[in-house]
Image (spheres, rainbow, N blue to C red):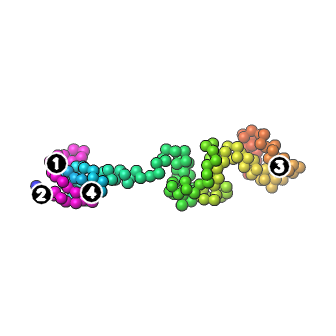
Amino acid sequence: MKNITGLKSKTLIVDKLVGRKPGKRGGQVTTWWETHCERCGAIGEHSINNLVSGKAGCLKCRRKINHLTHGESYTDLYRLWARIKHGGDACKEWGDYVTFKRNLPPLPNHKSTLIKIDKSLPYQPNNVEWATKDDRNKKKIVEFVKKAKEVGMFANQTEQQLIERFQKVSRQRLYELMKRVK
């Protein structure tokens, strides 16, 4: 049996022989060595095969690297970003959550959601704003009234009169009217 004490494999340095034992998942019996990480000092055991081939690495350091994130994966904002990203309607710059968060306007209150200002453009800086449910409904009413006026509906009323009128209409009725205008 070859003595590999002192061998360096990535950040690991081999300290001493542990013994022979089966590999993971009951594999072939092989020689195992105790190592320490020169970066973080963690002690671990690795098979000679992984040490010699360079496959062995410090598990503690790898976990740190893999978990060096924003720590917000379970927040509402992160879930919103994930929906936008996976929906394919975000600009390339917003493929990264931290950049997305940095580029957002301040959140006015917890009842707001992110909407696009120009629906023909993707979610991107300068094309988003926070809006409450009421804000979104008012925007839909304004859009509807403008389209309705363009096609000659409600010719005898001003846009402002129509907006005030349709703010009192149920959402379902408004959607029915909007379908007629499209």
Q: Which residue is mark 1?
A: 18
Q: Which residues are magenta?
A: 2-26
Task: Give the amino acid at mark 2.
Answer: Lys
Task: Give the amino acid at mark 3.
Answer: Gln
Q: Is residue 163 left or right of residue 51?
A: right
Q: Earlier in the sequence, mark 2 or mark 1?
A: 2
The percent position of residue 175, horizontal first and vertical second, equals 72, 44
Camera-side mark, 2 or 1 = 1
Q: Is residue 180 left or right of residue 104?
A: right
Q: Secondary structure at mark 2?
A: loop
Q: Residue at x 63, y 55 (%)?
A: 128
Mark 3 neighbour density, 10 Å: few (under 14) some (14–19) many (20 or more): few
Q: To which quarter of the image does residue 168 belong?
A: top right
Q: Residue at x 63, y 44 (%)?
A: 109
Q: Are marks 4 and 3 in contact (CB under 8 Å)?
A: no
Task: Give the amino acid at mark 4.
Answer: Glu
Quadrant where the N terminus lies? bottom left
Q: Is residue 126 left or right of residue 177?
A: left
Camera-side mark, 1 or 3 = 1
Q: Which residue is mark 2?
A: 2
Q: Secondary structure at mark 1?
A: strand
Camera-side mark, 4 or 2 = 4
**Which label is found at residue 38?**
4
Compute the Cα span from label 4 to label 1. Answer: 19 Å
Q: Earlier in the sequence, mark 1 or mark 3?
A: 1
Mark 1 neighbour density, 10 Å: few (under 14) some (14–19) many (20 or more): some
Q: Residue at x 57, y 57 (%)?
A: 103
**Which label is found at residue 160?**
3
Mark 4 neighbour density, 10 Å: few (under 14) some (14–19) many (20 or more): some
Q: Is residue 6 left or right of residue 41?
A: left
Mark 2 neighbour density, 10 Å: few (under 14) some (14–19) many (20 or more): few
